[in-house]
């Protein structure tokens, strides 16, 4: 643990109230932290009974558009676990629905698009996103930032590739065959589709950052199904456009995907301050692949949270130790919290990370 504490600075109380001075933001920018920041992807959601109670009878997409509900659901895991960040309660398809795409989030399945996108004419169903499409998002973020005080809010969007895969396949997909067929069969249309999606993602991130989110995360969850060559040719430029949309706002940018061990360097180069690492690659290897200019986020296997506590504890210790190789480390899972996770284990992980990384 020596190397973890070396990066930990003296506790200060002066400007504790500014989320831009939080350990999350500091770690993202490679600055010294008071203690290692920890939060969990999908921390707001089905693993919490208080979430299920609030959501009863309200459809997922509808719940994302009600500011009071969004605020309460976003705050639940912060209160319960004492995590170092809130993640905005929404979904990657919310901006697509906001511009008029006919889709639904089906429980147990995920986003389902009524008419899959396959032809140039389909682009007409994908107008650009303006802040006027999502006034409720601005309102929710403002309400949240007021409630959160010193705790930073992470805004997010889906990356063009992951969004395109839902639009082109029409729903979740194992092989992404229609997406890959379009990408390679009509590269012009693919590029135009992703350019439109990059505008939508970037604008959605910008709305959240301008309303007060302190950090943003671009989720390219399914990018790991691509070779590095295809990623760099067909995807990276569009993700770079989405990330560039908030470059002038000074909010650190996290870029995340699953199974992206071969893509980490290219995902960093798209314009990220932090690269998310899943549980397949050790943080030490990730840092080596990325080079010195990036912080890392990750990478506890969400399934390990079902193992006996000593296993979890040992792994958390290792992750903190490996993360110390990076200029900054945000402790997280390698992917989202699984629905049946015992919430008490998440709370224990937060306590352990804080205990181990506090001087
Ligand atoms: C691919 C993806 C989606 N949505 C998201 C991604 C990228 C992250 C990842 O890779 O896991 C991102 C997302 N979705 C949700 C959040 C909210 C904040 C948080 O992380 O806690 C975030 C950041 C809420 C949600 N999004 C969804 C839920 C579950 C809805 C419910 O409670 O009924 C939540 C809380 C629905 C959703 N939406 C999506 C899926 C695959 C699902 C699950 C479907 C299911 O198994 O029921 C698309």
Image (tube, grey):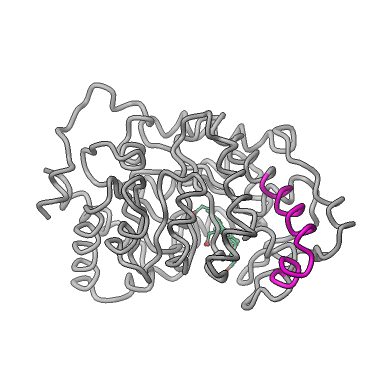
Residue 209, x across and y down, in percent: 54, 33
| Residue positioned 56% across, 30% down in the render | 211
Q: Quadrant of the C terminus?
A: top left
Residue 36 horizontal side relative to residue 28, left or right? left
In front: 134, or 244?
A: 244
Using the image, determine if residue 311 lies above or below residue 105: below
Q: Is residue 233 above or below residue 215?
A: below
Residue 153 can be seen in this image: no
Q: Report whether 228 appears left or right of 191.
A: left
Rendered image quadrant of residue 1: bottom left
Residue projecting furthest to the right: 121
Q: Give the total number of marks visible in the rendering.
A: 0
Tell me the residue at 64%/42% (across/down). 66
Q: Nearer the viewer, residue 135 or 28?
A: 28
Give the image location of residue 206, x and y in percent. 59, 35
Q: Is residue 7 magenta?
A: no
Please give the name of the residue rendered at 37% of the width and 55% of the height, measured from the top-left corner. 290
In this picture, residue 40 sits left or right of residue 113:
left
The reply to whether residue 304 is visible in this rendering is: yes
Residue 131, position in %: x, y?
70, 33
Magenta stretch: give its range: 179-198
x and y percentages locating residue 274 in the rendered image: 40, 48
Ligand 1 shows up in the quarter that is: bottom right
In the image, residue 243 sits, relative to residue 232, either above or below, namely above
User: What secondary structure prevails in the magenta region?
Assistant: helix
């Amino acid at each position: 643990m020596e190397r973890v504490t070396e990066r930990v600075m003296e506790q200060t109380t002066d400007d504790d109230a500014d989320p831009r001075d939080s350990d999350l933001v500091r770690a993202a920018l490679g600055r010294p932290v008071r203690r290692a920041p920890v939060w969990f992807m999908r921390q707001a959601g089905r693993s919490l009974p208080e979430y299920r109670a609030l959501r009863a009878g309200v459809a997922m997409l509808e719940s994302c558009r009600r500011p009071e509900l969004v605020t309460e659901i976003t705050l639940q895991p912060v209160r319960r676990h004492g995590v170092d960040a809130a993640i905005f309660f929404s979904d990657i398809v919310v901006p697509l629905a906001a511009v008029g795409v006919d889709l639904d989030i089906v429980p147990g399945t995920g986003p389902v698009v009524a008419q899959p996108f396959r032809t140039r004419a389909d682009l007409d169903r994908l107008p650009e996103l303006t802040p006027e499409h999502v006034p409720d998002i601005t309102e929710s973020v403002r309400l949240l930032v007021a409630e959160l005080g010193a705790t930073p809010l992470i805004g997010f969007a889906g990356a063009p590739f992951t969004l395109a895969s839902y639009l082109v396949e029409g729903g979740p997909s194992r092989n992404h065959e229609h997406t890959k067929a379009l990408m390679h069969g009509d590269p012009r249309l693919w590029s135009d589709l992703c350019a439109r999606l990059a505008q939508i993602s970037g604008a959605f991130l910008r709305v959240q950052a301008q309303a007060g989110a302190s950090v943003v995360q671009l989720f390219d969850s399914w990018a790991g199904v691509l070779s590095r060559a295809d990623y760099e040719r067909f995807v990276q430029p569009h993700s770079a456009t989405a990330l560039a949309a908030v470059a002038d706002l000074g909010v650190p940018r996290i870029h995340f995907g699953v199974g992206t061990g071969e893509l980490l360097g290219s995902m960093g180069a798209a314009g990220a301050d932090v690269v998310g690492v899943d549980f397949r690659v050790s943080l030490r290897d990730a840092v080596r692949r990325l080079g010195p200019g990036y912080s890392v986020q990750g990478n506890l296997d969400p399934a390990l949270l079902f193992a006996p506590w000593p296993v979890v504890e040992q792994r958390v210790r290792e992750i903190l130790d490996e993360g110390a190789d990076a200029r900054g480390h945000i402790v997280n899972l390698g992917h989202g919290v699984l629905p049946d996770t015992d919430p008490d284990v998440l709370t224990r992980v937060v306590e352990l990370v804080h205990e181990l990384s506090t001087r």
